Amino acid sequence: MFAFISQQPLPWQFGILFGIFVARSGLIAGTTTIWIHFSRWAQRRRIIAPKVGASVWRDVFFGIGILLLDAVVVLAAFRSGLMIGNHGSSLPIVLLTIAAFFVWVEIYFYYSHRLMHHPKLFWMHKHHHRERATNPWTSLSFSVVERFVLHVGTILIPALVSQFVPLSVDAYFAYFLINYLLNVYGHLNVETIPPWVLRRPWGQLLNTTTYHALHHSRYRGHFGLFTKYLDELHGTKFKDYERVHAEVGPR
């Protein structure tokens, strides 16, 4: 599909890419927002009570603006030759590239995220913390400056690496689909994982929604994106995480 996009005129390339981004967000964030609103099961498992009258529409509006920015930057990286990509990579290469991206983005996000929580830099990140109670569209609620910081790690640095090792385009977009799914899950503000899962070794491989909700409510810990390992390494994991999760999670 991405080979097809690259063969189109520039306006069509932009329109198709932006359309894919919007459709992806509407399908994933939109359907989960509707589910939370109408599901009694979800309402009973809210982690943080939203403010009275809180609306997701502001996040939707800002989110679409961020997707517009993403489409411009991604398209510019590929069309300028800064990002060198291969289409039709073998399955092992795709899987290996996805795994490498997962590890790299975890590392980059933890340290850049923690840095933006420094009092002198928090202005970049403040927009994302407008509300303590998140919703699926909070996954796209960023200031333009913060989004550019994320682009450094997810577009610029991979583009520089691609000058030496061409990037699997299929793996690149597949990883960011996975990234977005997990990002929406992290901002649900509804705990879907029962407590017994966290008592299994495999149950803590990825963070739960409660894990990230505690970051939004307390600010001073849980800087990791989808895993807890750098938080544990640097002492920024809250010691009462499992207890809080057990209080809100489904039985």
Image (cartoon, grey):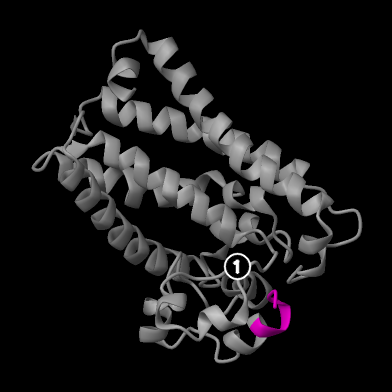
Q: Residue at x 62, y 57 (%)?
A: 128
Position of residue 207 in the picture relative to residue 78 (left or right): right
Q: At which x and y percent is residue 209?
A: 60, 67
| Image: 145 above or below 13 | below
Classify mark 1: helix, strand or loop.
Answer: helix
Q: Is residue 237 visible?
A: yes
**Magenta-colored stretch includes residue 37:** no
Q: At which x and y percent is residue 124?
A: 54, 56
Q: Name the outermost residue toward the top.
A: 9
Q: Is residue 123 visible?
A: no
Q: Residue at x 41, y 85 (%)?
A: 232
Residue 195 picture quarter: bottom right
| Image: 186 above or below 176 | below
Q: Residue at x 30, y 31 (%)?
A: 77
| Region in magenta | 246-251
Q: At which x and y percent is residue 204?
A: 45, 77
Seen from the viewer's position, the closer of residues 249 and 222 is 249
Q: Residue at x 51, y 64 (%)?
A: 121
How crowded pointer 1 is (Cα within 10 Å; few <14, some 14-19, many 20+) is rated as many
Pointer 1 residue: 209
